[in-house]
C-alpha cells in the first residue's frame, strides 16, 4: 500500500466539505487526483441501537436508534479502510442514507442539502492490533496494527449529526491536521 499512496497526504477537510458540482464520492475524487483508482463497497445499511461511544457522541438517549452505513474503501482494488458512519434517525431516516445504495455526490452532499454541514469536527486517532475480522477484511497478517480514527461532525450550532469509525491499514498512511487558533 505504501507504493499505492505514493506521497498522498490525507486531510479530513475534503471529506467534510460538500463538493460543488461533483457526482462521485470524495474518496474516488481524491484517489483520481493522485493517479489512483478509489471506490467503496457498501457492506451494510441498517437502523440500530449504536455502540455506547456513538450514542454519546451523537447525544442520543439510551436505546435511541441511528442509521449506520458500513463501507470498505478500496484503493486500486485493495481494501485499505473499513468505515462505519452513524447518523441519528431524524437526520438520515427516509433519505438515501438509509438505503442500501450509493449516494450521488456522496453523503456529505446529501447532508448539506438537508442543512447539515460540518462547522466543527472532533477526531481521535489511535493505533491497536487488528481484530481477526479486521485483519481478514484488510488483508493484513495476524497481529498487524491498524489506525483507528473516530470523528464526530457538528453543525454551526453544535448539533452532532455524524459519528464515523474508520479502521485503516496504517502502511503508507499519513494524516495531516491543520489547526487555526482564534
Image (spheres, rainbow, N blue to C red):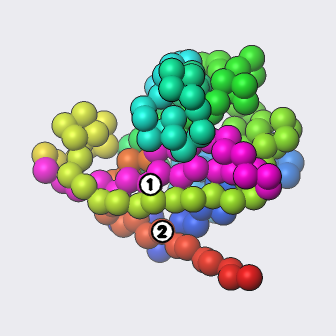
Answer yes or no: do the residues labelled 2 and 1 have beta carbons within 8 Å?
Answer: yes
As measured in the structure, the alpha-carbon distance from the residue carrying label 2 to the one carrying label 1 is 10 Å
**Quarter-of-image position of residue 91:** top right
Residue 123: give its label. Answer: none
The image shows residue 101, relative to residue 144, as above or below, that is above
Main SS of the magenta part reads strand
Q: Which residue is mark 2?
A: 175
Locate residue 139, reporting x and y percent: 26, 43
Identified at 65% across, 18% down, the residue is 99
The image shows residue 167, relative to residue 85, as above or below, that is below
Identified at 78% across, 43% down, the residue is 116
Q: Is residue 167 visible?
A: yes
Q: Quadrant of the N terminus?
A: bottom left
Task: Please check the rendered image and state whether residue 55 is part of the magenta-colored stretch, yes or no.
Answer: no
Q: Residues within 10 Å of mark 2 (few under 14, many from 20)?
A: few
Identified at 54% across, 44% down, the residue is 57
Locate residue 21, reporting x and y percent: 86, 48
Q: Which residue is mark 1?
A: 149
* 94, 158: nearer the viewer: 158
The image shows residue 161, relative to residue 48, as above or below, that is below
> Along the polypeptide, which appears first: circle 2 or circle 1?
1
Range shown magenta: 143-165
Q: Residues within 10 Å of mark 1 (few under 14, many from 20)?
A: some
Q: Quadrant of the C terminus?
A: bottom right
**Quarter-of-image position of residue 132:** top left
Amino acid at each position: 500500500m505504501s507504493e499505492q499512496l505514493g506521497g498522498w497526504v490525507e486531510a479530513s477537510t475534503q471529506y467534510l466539505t460538500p463538493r460543488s458540482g461533483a457526482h462521485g464520492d470524495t474518496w474516488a475524487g481524491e484517489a483520481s487526483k493522485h493517479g489512483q483508482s478509489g471506490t467503496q463497497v457498501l457492506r451494510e445499511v441498517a437502523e440500530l441501537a449504536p455502540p455506547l461511544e456513538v450514542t454519546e457522541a451523537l447525544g442520543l438517549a439510551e436505546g435511541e436508534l441511528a442509521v449506520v452505513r458500513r463501507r470498505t474503501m478500496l484503493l486500486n482494488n485493495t481494501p485499505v479502510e473499513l468505515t462505519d458512519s452513524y447518523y441519528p434517525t431524524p437526520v438520515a431516516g427516509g433519505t438515501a442514507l438509509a438505503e442500501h445504495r450509493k449516494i450521488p455526490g456522496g453523503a456529505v452532499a446529501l447532508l448539506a442539502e438537508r442543512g447539515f454541514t460540518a462547522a466543527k469536527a472532533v477526531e481521535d486517532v489511535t493505533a491497536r492490533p487488528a481484530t481477526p475480522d479486521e485483519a481478514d477484511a484488510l488483508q493484513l497478517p495476524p497481529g498487524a496494527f491498524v489506525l483507528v480514527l473516530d470523528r464526530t461532525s457538528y453543525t454551526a450550532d453544535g448539533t452532532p449529526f455524524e459519528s464515523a469509525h474508520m479502521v485503516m491499514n496504517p502502511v503508507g498512511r499519513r494524516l495531516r491536521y491543520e489547526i487555526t487558533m482564534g
